[in-house]
Image (tube, coloured by chain):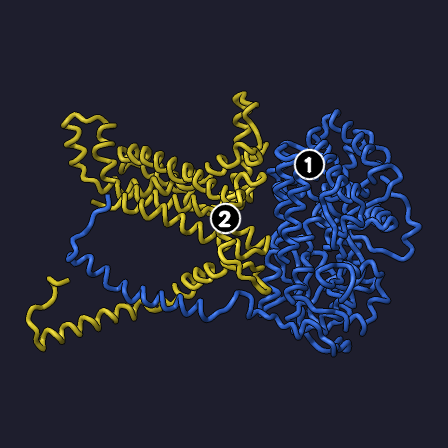
Chain colours: A yellow, B blue
Amino acid sequence: MSSTRPTKVGAVAVRGRRRLRARRWAGWLFALPALAFYGVFNFYPVLLSIQYSFYDWDGVGASTWVGLENYTAVFTDSEQFTTLLHAFYLILFFTVLPVTIALITASVLRQLEGRFTGALARTLLFLPQIIPGAAAGVAWTWMYSDNGVINQLLRAVGLDDVARPWLADFTWALTAVGFIGTWLSTGLCTMLLLSGIGKIDGSLYEAARIDGAGPIRQFRAVTLPGLRNEIGVCVTITIIAALASFDVVYLSTQGGPGTQTMVPGVAVYNLAFNDARLGAASALAVVLALVVIAVVVPLQRLFREK
Amino acid sequence: MPKQQHPTSPVRTARRRPRTPLAAVAAASALATLAACGAPGSDSDSGSADATPTAVNTAVADKSATLTLFSAAGLEKYEQGLADAFMAQYPKIKVKLRVEADNNYNTVLPRLLASDSTPDIVQPYDLLGGVKDNLLTNLNAYDEAYGWSEKVPASALAPGRVSDGVIGSGPLYQAGGSAGPLVGVFYNKELANKVGMKTVPSSISELEDVMAKAKKSGVTPIVASNQDGLIGHLYNLLLGDYMGAQSLSDLVHHKPGASLDTPEAVKATKTLQKWIKAGYFTSDVNALNQEASYGKFTGGKGLFFFQGSWITQTLDQNFKGEYGAFPMPPAEKGGKYAGMTSNTLAFSIAARSKNKDAAALFLDFLTTPKAAEVAVDNGYAALTSGASDAAEPSLSGTLTEQIQTGYAAIAADNGFDSWLQNSAPAVGTKLTQQLQLLVSGKVEPAAMVKTLQTAYADALKSS
């Protein structure tokens, strides 16, 4: 700041500074409508949730101040705490798998760049992205059902013992739900990474090839470092989708069987709207938001461009 | 690696500067917000003055008004029928339906009732919650004006009375005529023939015999859905059988001292567990929702369907004449019938309704035979005074006749009770989870009953 400050104090400089300041406030004026909306529809509700989280309230009638009781419950009530663990398990399927698959696909597709097959493959990969999570949840329910296509395939190849109603299976339900997330996220990640690969200077690959680097070496030495930013975006978006998941889980299992697939998003909904416990729901929601921030902020730093 | 930018770099200055005012604004408005409003709900005194009207007007038939009836999608046809019949009699008053998905009805209702755009006529499951929060109208003045208490059987109005957080007596909050669903055993006629069911099973063990025979001949004994916890209908029927209708009702109505943690409830749970272990349900029952179970039953994929007669509104479209119904057999032969019902001809008036007088006229219309006729046409049973000499439940006769005789048989034994989940919303959530655990063999009956009792006690404590 000191380097930009004028060294000579004079009328011209003062007027210039004033104009500069005015222009700065003019910018805020332009942002005001958006800020007002943000304040009313985002910021204010967040504050309300924080306030509610200290009360025992059914959403309509009188409320009682309970201090931190709702927060203690999040960590001591095993049912609420497990939902957070489930959310972290989903990261495996919403983030790790899609990003890995997308990296491989994007590298392969790079070779097909410009050809018809390339365009076709890209379109097909991106298709899941235009289907809402809710619709995907319903469609996958059918595929996972006892007579669904997945079990039909398993039985067709003689794996009758493996076939089961996946979403009703205690051991496999959460994993089954996770794969819906994988299917949803992979297309988005592939598209992001493909566009990233396109920006990598072709001569780098050429130089690597001349130096005798095979495809795997090229991938590690050129593609991966070049995609740092894009991978960061993919990881951030999908981790948030995993931790704050709602639509897919709600429509495929509603958290069942038992509480095997209960995630914080669905638990918050249940507490708030089915059980009429707004305070407990708000506390869990606040904890979830803090968890998301705690996970995403360090990641942002990790992936920030050097 | 996080990399520190040079402190004087222009990028940093440009990004830092605006943050100060933003943070200040944010902090200021945060403080203002938290200071401005007191405890949540303290300002939502939803017109408790209006909740108990005293000066009521019954001469409203000629004043034009528009009433909104909040309906659940599964009941739309029936409630439209009531509205049409009412409008035919009182052409000046319009009744419009506002339809919500079945599983959202109760979720949305309290918030709607507290809002400025409340529907006038509603049917809340959580009557106690609605009364506690001053969302429903005390109908005593209308009762006096129209004489409902004289016209309608006391037993039909009792579930609409609330005093001190207990259902059954006191001021009237839900009123109308008297009709309700038969909740019992629906059966596929063709499969019943196939397994040789010749008469209505007269005890739980006779019912078990039929199911065992069905299982042996490759017929799935029970169609159900449990992703949504609807095995709960069967579970609730078993609870009523073993606990007795009165004990179950006491629990639902929050009668002091009522408890679920009883040997009878454990016995009912054990019976359900036995059927699960015997393979009477399909293995994917935890993954099915109600629509899927409708499809399975009409597709001939199972013999019995423990449900309520509201299903006829959906099933009759392509399965009419193919299925019949009888009441849940008593626990022991010669014992008392028990089954859940709810008065489908009784509604509540929102405390914030601006058309209370017209809405009360609608409730009065529900006490007439015309309204009862609409109910019967839609698969419900209406209790007539001559029901005591009703015929025994049988496998012959039309479905409508079977529903009427089944309902009358339960009524004759004073066997009507209610759903456990109606005792408190949180109990419903817990019940669904526990039933899924029971199906998967992850919980034992005694533990399940204890968990439900804890949820019930917790809910009562906070209400």
Q: Nearer the viewer, residue B162 or A135?
A: B162
Q: Say what secondary structure mark 2 lies in.
A: helix
Residue at 60% of width from left, 70% of height from top?
A: B45
Chain letter for mark 1: B
Q: Which mark is residue B282?
A: none
x, y percentage for residue A127? 41, 42
Residue at 71% of width from left, 64% of height from top?
A: B348
Q: Amino acid at mark 1?
A: Pro
Q: Nearer the viewer, residue B355 or B417?
A: B417
x, y percentage for residue B105? 63, 56
Q: Amino acid at mark 2?
A: Val
Residue at 73% of width from left, 27% of height from top?
A: B215
Residue at 56% of width from left, 50% of height from top?
A: A270
Q: Say what secondary structure mark 1 lies in.
A: helix
Please, which residue is most extreme toward the right here?
Answer: B389
Q: Which mark is residue B445?
A: 1
x, y percentage for residue B235? 72, 41
